[in-house]
């Protein structure tokens, strides 16, 4: 697990344990494509698997597509669909079957305009819709960055939302790194069958 970014390492470990051959996963914040690439490696070897990636920025999707083209066999790329739109429209795309995993790595694109960060209202709208879309035993993986103002608001709002999910239907876990001020945190939220 990455020592510098343990939240990312832990998220990737969860994904590896959770995903099964033929699953559909959605990356709701493609950014530089590192998470999408992890999902592609885990999933696309199976001919029925699908991967959908969202970002509001063309530059992010271009970087993600470039990374996948460099590192994933060409025949696998046919099962990747990119959506340049807000992830609050996650319920607007036709899906052949329910996603097993929907991933959010919130915040802004590293090295780009920090104003183009995820926003509490649209993030919550998207995550609520995602919770309705995922299949039985499906999961949401959400990385938060409380070290910047909007990121703190997002984390606070998500904590309130997640704590209200009924325990008969959801396992809700929030990982926080206690000895680092304002460290990123990770939610793992899984539907109970
Ligand atoms: C921290 S980055 C994601 C990092 C990425 N997963 C990776 O592995 O490189 C956050 C991304 O969310 C995108 N974003 C911001 N608001 C969004 C929205 N409403 N819908 C979809 N993507 C959004 C930003 O453009 C940025 O690329």
Image (spheres, rainbow, N blue to C red):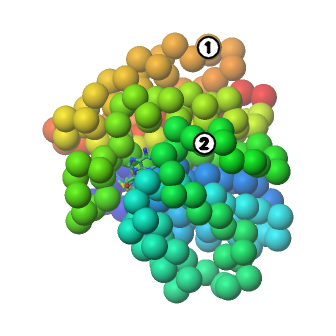
Q: Which residue is mark 2?
A: 90
> Closer to us: mark 1 or mark 2?
2
Residue at 22%, 52% (x, y): give it. 114
Is 36 situated left or right of 48 in this image? Answer: left
Residue at 70%, 35% (x, y): give it. 133
Rendered-image quadrant of the N terminus: bottom left
Q: Percent from the top left, x then y, of residue 165?
A: 57, 17
Q: Percent from the top left, x then y, of residue 143?
A: 40, 44
Closer-to-camera residue (132/113)? 113
The answer for how far apart the CA atoms under marks 1 and 2 are is 23 Å
| Mark 2, secondary structure of its residue | helix
Rendered-image quadrant of the C terminus: top right
Is 23 situated left or right of 171 in this image? Answer: right
| Mark 1, secondary structure of its residue | loop
Is 125 situated left or right of 3 in this image? Answer: right
Q: Which residue is mark 1?
A: 166
Q: Percent from the top left, x then y, of residue 140?
A: 57, 39
Label 1 vs 2, first from the N-terminus:
2
Q: Residue 184's image quarter?
A: top left
Q: Residue 46's image quarter?
A: bottom right
Q: Percent from the top left, x then y, of residue 82?
A: 59, 63
Can residue 39 be seen in this snapshot?
no
Q: Residues within 10 Å of mark 1 (few under 14, many from 20)?
A: few
């Amino acid at each position: 697990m990455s020592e510098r970014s343990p939240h990312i390492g832990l998220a990737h470990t969860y994904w590896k344990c959770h995903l099964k051959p033929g699953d559909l996963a959605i990356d709701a914040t493609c950014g530089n494509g590192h998470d999408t690439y992890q999902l592609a490696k885990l999933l696309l070897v199976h001919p029925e698997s699908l991967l959908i990636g969202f970002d509001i920025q063309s530059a992010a999707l271009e970087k993600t597509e470039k990374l996948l083209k460099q590192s994933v066999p060409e025949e696998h790329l046919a099962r990747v669909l990119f959506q340049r739109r807000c992830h609050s429209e996650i319920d607007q795309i036709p899906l052949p079957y329910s996603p097993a995993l929907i991933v959010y790595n919130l915040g802004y694109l590293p090295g780009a305009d920090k104003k183009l960060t995820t926003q509490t209202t649209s993030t919550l709208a998207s995550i609520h819709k995602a919770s309705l879309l995922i299949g039985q035993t499906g999961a949401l993986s959400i990385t938060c960055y409380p070290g910047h103002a909007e990121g703190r608001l997002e984390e606070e709002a998500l904590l309130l939302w997640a704590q209200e999910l009924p325990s008969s239907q959801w396992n809700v876990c929030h990982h926080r790194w206690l000895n680092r001020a304002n460290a990123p945190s990770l939610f793992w939220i899984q539907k109970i069958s």
